[in-house]
Image (cartoon, rainbow, N blue to C red):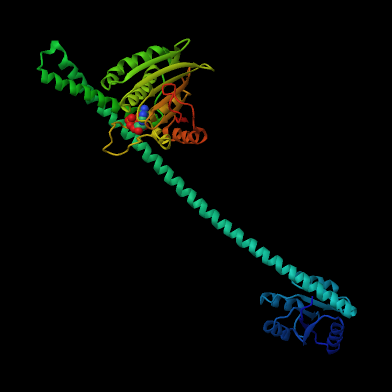
Amino acid sequence: MDEKLKILVVDDDEVERMAIRRALDNSGVRMELSEVNNGHSAISALRNNKFDCAFIDYRLPDQDTLTLIKTLYSLNIKIPLVVLTSQGDEQVAVELMKVGAVDYLSKSRVSAETLAQVLRHAIRVHRAEMQAAIAYQQLRESHEQLIRKNQELERQRQQIQIQNLKLLEASRLKSQFLATMSHELRTPMNAIIGFSQILLRPKFGSLTGQQTDMVERILNNGKHLLMLVNEVLDFSRLEEGQLELKPELVDLAKIINTVVGEMSSLAEAKKLSLIINFNLQNPLIVNDPSRIKQILINLLSNAIKFTESGSIWVEAKDLPGNRVAIAVKDTGIGIASKDFKHIFEAFRQVDQSITRKYPGTGLGLAIIESLVQMMNGKIFLESELGVGSIFTIELPKQISSSNSSVPKSSVQMENQQMINSTQRLHQSPPKSNQSSNKYQKLKR
Ligand code: ADP
């Protein structure tokens, strides 16, 4: 402690003050000493000057030391206070330390050494106490800050929860609207299709060539519209978790042959060759035939829609673990890897413009994905722009009858995680196009 200390001695006895002064002078501590002889003067000296330490007589003429220490404390005067006690005052001095005195010293022990020691100790203790107080204050402030931040976070969490509830309700209303609308649209659509089919029957009466052509157009457009309406209805049912699979023992090869047969006219119209390739030991599987058919129709109609020339392959093969893979390959426009994730989302198409070349609702792949998921299967996409695409579905050969759709909101969340964890690049070219080695593969 090399700095010059400012010290105050409070004692009404001139002789005792002198003894302390002398002892302090001899202690070797650099200091500036002030003296007062009562509590009142001590308060005013301590209020007006900054002291490093004060020695206070326990017995002051105008007030007791306990009151003085409490007054100093209430005035926020915080300096080390050492109480000077007489014989027999020690017990009281301990009480004084409880209200703020740093130490006490019996007047009978006053010497240069004891004063220097007590002074150093008092200042050290006081500084440590001050530092602890500052640290405590800082801790309290950061604790309060944390509480405030927590309250803010809690407020935000509650807001997000309210928003979520609102979103869920809006989504539920949207699904309900889609379901009601598509259901209502199906009745008039079926009437349009039914009556145009009756009109085309020869026994109904003969139509002119132009009339036949017009009725055929009504029929074809009606069928197309019904298909779109059914797609919307399926999607809203999947979203609501209301779609159930009806598994039965079916011949997969037969289903594929039927679907390919039904779609062959569309491929022929675009001069695309449609090739079937089976590698199945036993084509019998347990699954919902109408949903397998729906998946195949969607994949095949996409392959035909997005292919201008070349071929389309439908392949089915056994996989280890009692599973089966169905792949639809095309030599069409292909899909950029950046769009892999999005095209499986509802209403998402690579070309979202109104002037797009290829028509569609953008629901096909979203429905396929949900159905495949209900079947405990996986869907893989490999594609390269300008070269072609392969959509592969891997399914267990036997699905359980308890499979029903999970509400779409949770399906989408799970899928999002799956995309993140399984998106990967695949370097092997498709069998149909050995020259291409840049097919990207996405497993979902
Ligand atoms: P839609 O065919 O009604 O637009 P889908 O959900 O079936 O909706 O497909 C979403 C999008 O994925 C399509 O709009 C298209 O951009 C892309 N897509 C799907 N299949 C193919 C394919 N075989 N070749 C190229 N693009 C495809």
Q: Which residue sits at x=27%, y=22%?
A: 270
Q: Quadrant of ligand 1?
A: top left
Q: As rendered, which of 245 and 362 lies closer to the eye?
A: 362
The image quarter in which residue 344 lies: top left
Q: Which residue sits at x=14%, y=11%?
A: 202
Can residue 373 be seen by looking at this rendering? no
Q: As rendered, which of 355 and 230 lies closer to the eye?
A: 355
The image quarter in which residue 307 lies: top left
Position of residue 281 relative to residue 187, above or below, is above
Position of residue 24 relative to residue 349, above or below, is below
Where's residue 235, x and y in %? Answer: 36, 30
Position of residue 326 relative to residue 163, above or below, is above
Where's residue 243, x and y in %? Answer: 39, 25
Can residue 412 be seen by looking at this rendering? yes
- Judged from this view, the residue extending furthest toward the bottom is 14
Q: As rendered, which of 332 and 400 lies closer to the eye?
A: 332
Position of residue 159 relative to residue 294, above or below, is below
- Judged from this view, the residue extending furthest toward the front is 435
Q: As rendered, which of 97 and 288 lies closer to the eye?
A: 288
Where's residue 283, x and y in %? Answer: 44, 11
Tally of marks: 0
Side of 191 relative to 343 (left or right):
left
Side of 344 relative to 12 (left or right):
left
Where's residue 176, x and y in %? Answer: 34, 34
Side of 184 relative to 149 (left or right):
left
Q: Quadrant of the N terminus?
A: bottom right
The image quarter in which residue 100 lies: bottom right
